Image (cartoon, rainbow, N blue to C red):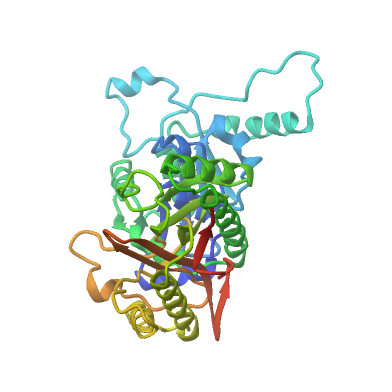
Amino acid sequence: MLLNRTRATAIMAKYELEGLVAREHINIHYLTDYWDTQADGRWPYLVYGVLPRRDDAPAGLVLPTVKLERLTPWPTWVPNLVAFSDYSGRERVERGAFDPRHEEPKAARWGGWPTRAGAELSPLEQHWTALARRHADHLAATPAWGLRRALKDAGLTRGRIGSDDPRVLHWMREMGLPDIVPVDSTNVFREIRMVKSEAEIAVMAEAARINEAACYAAAAVARDGTTWEEIETTYHLEMSRRGGRNGHIITALGGLPHGRVRRGEPFLVDALGEYRNYFGDFGRTVIVGEPSSELRRRADAMKAGFAAACDVIRPGLKRSALIGHVVSAVQQAGFPDFFYCSPHSIGLEHTDQPIPMGATLHGEATDYALERNMVINIDMPFFEWGWGTMHLEDTIVVGDHGVRALTRLDDALIINGE
């Protein structure tokens, strides 16, 4: 189970929520362990996860009948599977004779894919066929009707319910659950996800390892005249070869200032790749040729700033205080022009923490305190047009008395000689 159930219960209580409904694919995955193809195809409103605050109420997963087979590579821990097919008697619905406030429509029956007569089915085919037949006689008609049923099964028919897409809860009110109070909980999900379970940390350790190795392999191709596309292509190939999924690798957001790598001019690499849907994030400075004394001094100072961060990180330390420690340490170590550091939680999102949205959660509200088992990146980019760009970024786990590194914390410079 990826879900940190204890934390989820505590955060729901903090915001007086009776339960959560996930529509975004990363939150469905977090609540249920299930990963749907909708996440890659960006097909919305097909799958939902439901998590009640009460431990004795059943968590639910709503998914299409044709996706039941998907539970083989991505099994779920939730006890209540609600599969949906389509309306049976669509004409009656479309003519307005159906009242969704009082009546659930009958679903079309679906008992699985055709089976060839006399064929010897593999164990998986037997399992898939049995799973489809098990659900065939109690299907919901649509995703929304499946969600309504999962909410009723979990006792979530009234009170404050949170969702990362509160529109779906307004649909529930129109579909006979008028006592639900929808609460936008996009940042509630992020607040829960900030503190990782041990299962998540294990996945993230592998994500960090794969992404770091792919980044080093990509940086290694840099020579005088190398294009960014060559570096980028190498990164993507290396991520796939190592069992990861491509995110992106960037240098300056507009690309290399001269269109190609130039000998003697430092440039940053910042790689963000996925493994089992969790991100690895890693950054370094690359130089082709012998580094100048100034570059070495700056790189050493940035490494000193990172070490200073590791020395002070403890549960309770505010993000703003951490930034101050890093910037001050880098400047005092011989890099007075350094001014920017952006520590961020990482996980199912690059920034796996509450972020400013609308008129709320600005300033002090987003200056979160570190907590045990947060996985964070100390993100330290530097840009100076006419000279070059630099970066130092590694991933650590916050412990009670220090940090545990998920990346190697090696030299701040990647030097490619010619």
Q: Nearer the viewer, residue 400 or 339?
A: 339
Quadrant of residue 161 in the image? Answer: bottom left
Q: Is residue 18 visible?
A: no
Query: Going by the image, does 64 lie left or right of 136?
Result: left
Give the image location of residue 224, x and y in percent: 45, 48
Q: Would you place residue 262 above or below residue 123 in this image?
A: below
Query: In the image, residue 192 lies at what x, y percent?
Result: 44, 66
Q: Looking at this view, name the residue that lies furthest to the top.
A: 117
Eyeballing the image, is 119 above or below 185?
A: above
The residue located at (34%, 79%) in the rendering is 327
Residue at 41 percent of width and 64 percent of height:
391
- Residue 274, visible in the rendered structure: yes
Q: Is residue 379 left or right of residue 206?
A: left
Given residues 142 and 321, the one toward you in this image is 321
Location of residue 1 in the rendering, given as x and y in whole percent from the top left corner: 61, 58
Farthest left residue in view = 359
Q: Is residue 362 left or right of residue 317?
A: left
Q: Position of residue 102 (x, y in %)?
A: 34, 38
Q: Of 213 and 16, which appears nearest the observer?
A: 213
Horizontal side, residue 123 vs residue 241: left or right: right
User: Which residue corresponds to the image point at 45% horizontal and 31% vertical from the top-left?
Assistant: 141
